[in-house]
Amino acid sequence: MKRQINRVWDEAERKKHGQQVRDRFARDRAEKLSYAKVAIDELIGQGITVSQNEVARKTGISVGFVNKHLRGEVEQARQRQRQMSQKHRTAVSVTSLEKDNERLKASNRRLQLELDKHRQINKELLAQVSKIVDLEDEVELLRSQNRELLAVWKVNQEKVVNLPTGNQPAHKNGVRKDNFSVLIQTELEALGIQLTSTLRKTMEAAHEETVVRAIEALKAALEKNDIRSPGGWLKRAIEGGWSQNERRQRQEKDPYPEGFKEWYEQAVKANFVLDIPIEHLNLDERNEPKVKINQPGIFGAPYRDLSWREAKIEMLNFHN
C-alpha cells in the first residue's frame, strides 16, 4: 500500500492553484456558451421553437446551466422567431388581401354592368308606364262615352216603345194626348210658351217624364234668371234630358274633397306621387281620387295605386 502523504500548501501555491481552477471553469463555460449559441442559431434555422429544454437537449448541457447563463439568449431567440413568424403572416395576409381586392374589383365590374342593364330596363318600364297611364286615361274617356251612349240608347228605346201606332186626335193646342198630359198643357199655357212646330216635334219625340222634368227646370231657372226665349230653353232642356243641367250643377260645386287639391300639390312637389293632372285621376269606391305613389308596387310596377286619404297618412309617416 502506498502511504498517503499530506502535502502542505503555502499561500502562494494555494492562490496559483485556485486561479488555475477558475481559468479552467471559465474556459469550459465559454466553450459551452459558444456551442449553445451555435445550437440556438441552428434551431432557429430549422424552424424549431427555442426553449431552455430544447437547447439543453441539443447541446447536452444541463438545463440548470442554460437557465443560469443562457436565459437572455433564449429569450432573444424566441423574440426573433416571433418577429419572423409575424412578418411571414403579414406577407401572406398582404398577398391574400391583394387577391381579394382583385376579386372584388372583378365582382364590382360585373355588378356595374348589371346595374347599367337594370337602369336601362327601368327606363323602358317607365316609358311603358307612361303609355299605360295614357291608355288608362283613354279607357276612362271611352267608358265615359260608353255610359253616355248607353243612356242615349235607353232613351231611344223608350222612344221606340212609346211611338204612336196610328193617327190619333190632337189637342186644340196641337199637343197629342197620348204623349202629353193635361198638366203639361196647363204648364205650357201658364208659362206663355207658344207651341211651335220645332218644339212640338221635340216634345213628341221625348218621354213624358223628360218633358215634365224639363218644364220644372225651366220654372226654377225663370225664378233666378231673365230668359228671353223660354221655348228655346225648354227645347234644349228636353233634348239634353237634364244632362246639361246636372253637368252645370256639378261644375258649380267643387267635385274634389276638401283639402285634396292643397295636399296633392304638396305631394307632387315632394315627389311623393306621380305628377298626373287631377282630372285624369281614377276614383275609388267612395268616388274619391286615387293617386300613384312614387314607389315600386308588389307586381314590379314602378308606382302604387292608393286612395288619397291613405296616401296622405303614409306621406306623414314617411316624413316623420
Image (cartoon, helix red, strand yellow):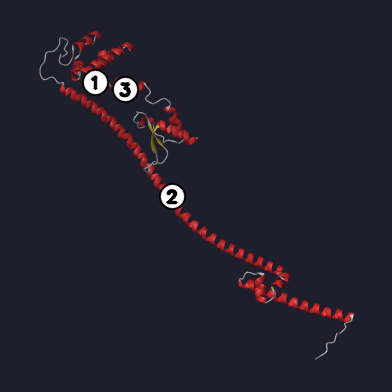
Judge by depth and name the residue closer to the eye, 67 or 197.
Answer: 67
Residue type at the position of mark 3: Arg
For label 3, the SS is helix
Q: Quadrant of the N terminus?
A: bottom right
Residue 151 falls left or right of residue 165: right
Residue in the picture at 63% in, 65% down? 82
Residue 186 position, x and y percent, is 21, 9
Residue 134 against residue 57 in the figure, above or below: above
Residue type at the position of mark 2: Asp
For label 1, the SS is helix
Judge by depth and name the residue closer to the eye, 142 or 88.
Answer: 88
Q: CA distance from mark 2 to mark 1?
A: 60 Å
Residue in the picture at 30% in, 32% down? 141
Mark 1 Cα within 10 Å, few/some/many (few <14, many 20+)? some
Q: What residue is disc 3 on?
A: 247
Q: What residue is disc 2 on?
A: 116
Residue in the picture at 63% in, 72% down? 45
Q: Quadrant of residue 123?
A: top left
Residue 280 against residue 250 in the figure, above or below: below
Q: CA distance from mark 3 to mark 2?
A: 51 Å
Task: Give the label on residue 239, or none.
Answer: 1
